[in-house]
Amino acid sequence: MSTEHANPQTPLSAPRDIGAARLAKVYAQAIVEAADRQQCRTAVIEELSQLVDEVLPKVANLVAVLESPRVSVGDKTSIVNTTLAGKVSPTTLNALLVLAQHDRLSILPEIVAAVRREVDSREGRRQAVLTTASPIPADAQTDLLHSIEQSLGTPLAATFAVNPDLLGGLVVRVEDTVYDHSVATSLVSLAERLKQRSIHEIQHRRDRLGSA
């Protein structure tokens, strides 16, 4: 479960298109299958996610080298091996080396996102985006997601987004389905109650600290 307010720029800035998405899905399936054979799925996902979300954004020079068509595939492979050998699991390292050898590191963010979707699919979770007019606290997000899962009768891999221009307060999209106004209205009411509860809890804590 994650929250987004806008579409952040990915650390590797190669053009993103349908072809890249399809290619990313193929690599993602291969990575998940390799991780499952080695029984290290969780570790591989965590390592790839950390690389894309935390490491690459902080190392601009490395990103530029991995993207550059002037850097040979052999050099990119060597950089990956030198930089990450011993710091990630052998399965993660092998996946990155394969991507380097095929000059596909430029779509690493798409591949990592596809890995997450592949795992969600294999574990029976459907992709969902819950868009609210204003941010709601993490505990309220959890309660809201749980309520929607119960209503739909299916587990969800949810992303929370914020759109201040949203009318009605909440839009629920599960894969290709956007739920109608009657469903959304009841969920808006729940979201508002959760938000107000969180506000009251924060105020209560402040009052207790003030009296202390």
Image (cartoon, grey):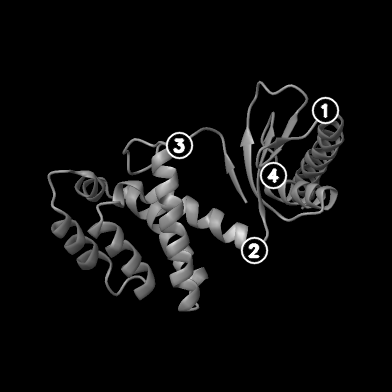
Residue picked out by circle 3: 8
Q: Position of residue 163 (x, y in %)?
A: 63, 27
Q: CA distance from mark 3 to mark 2?
A: 27 Å
Q: CA distance from mark 1 to mark 2?
A: 29 Å
Label 3 close to label 4 by CB (< 8 Å): no
Which secondary structure lies at badge 4? loop
Q: For the residue marked with disc 2, what is the amino acid?
A: Glu
* Discs 4/2, front: 2
Q: For the residue marked with disc 4, what is the amino acid?
A: Pro
Instruction: Tell which of 59 and 154 is nearer to you.
Output: 154
Mark 4 / mark 2, whichever is N-terminal: 2
Instruction: Tell which of 113 and 1 is nearer to you.
Output: 113
Residue picked out by circle 4: 137
* Discs 1/4, front: 1
**Which residue is found at the position 66% from the left and 38% from the top?**
176
Residue 200 picture quarter: top right
